[in-house]
Amino acid sequence: MRATTLHAALGAGVRPGSTVAVVGDGAVGLCGVPAARRLGAERIIALGRHRARTDIARTFGATDVVAERGEEAVRGGVAPVRGYIPELLPDVLDGTLDPAPVFDRTVDLAGVPDGYRAMDDRTALKVLVKP
């Protein structure tokens, strides 16, 4: 889970029993699902158009998937993500949070430009760099 999504979920007031709509099926959107689940959301609706990605959302705990969204479903802002690292990193290291499903391509350092291009072209969800 990305610290960005935990910040977004906290900013949105997610709490136990909440219903949450996570907009987008990119890496950040997908990571919003476990962030909402971590804060106790009861119903998590993932909005996305790509079946392989919404399947990941379901794996992460989305209870519903909506394949369409309107222009008014746009959210964003600055997130102070470094502040969440002490809370999130232990969960990643002990396996409580598994970000692996969002990494669908691996590159070495020389392949970084191709990795960014693939994400921009939407042929890769998130690229893992292994030096």
Image (cartoon, rainbow, N blue to C red):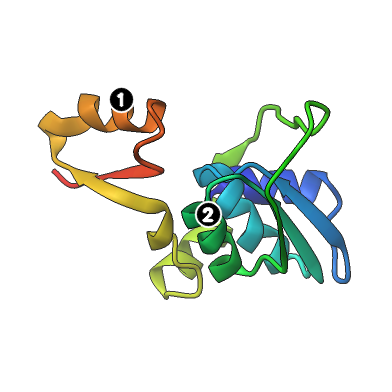
Marking on residue 109 = none
Quadrant housing residue 101: bottom left
From the top left corner, tell me how far across and down residue 46 is, in percent. 69, 54
Residue identifier under label 2 = 51
Q: Is residue 16 above or below residue 44?
A: below
From the top left corner, tell me how far across and down residue 8 is, in percent. 72, 44
Residue identifier under label 1 = 117
User: Disc 1 residue type?
Assistant: Arg
Q: Earlier in the sequence, mark 1 or mark 2?
A: 2
Circle 2 — which element?
Answer: helix
User: Disc 2 residue type?
Assistant: Arg
Residue at 62% x, 63% y is 34
From the top left corner, tell me how far across and down residue 28 is, in percent. 56, 43
Left or right? Give the position of 105 relative to 49: left
From the top left corner, tell me how far across and down residue 47 is, in percent. 69, 48
Quadrant housing residue 58: bottom right
Quadrant housing residue 62: bottom right
Residue 83 at least partly seen: no
Q: Considering depth in this image, is 73 or 88 the residue closer to the camera?
A: 73
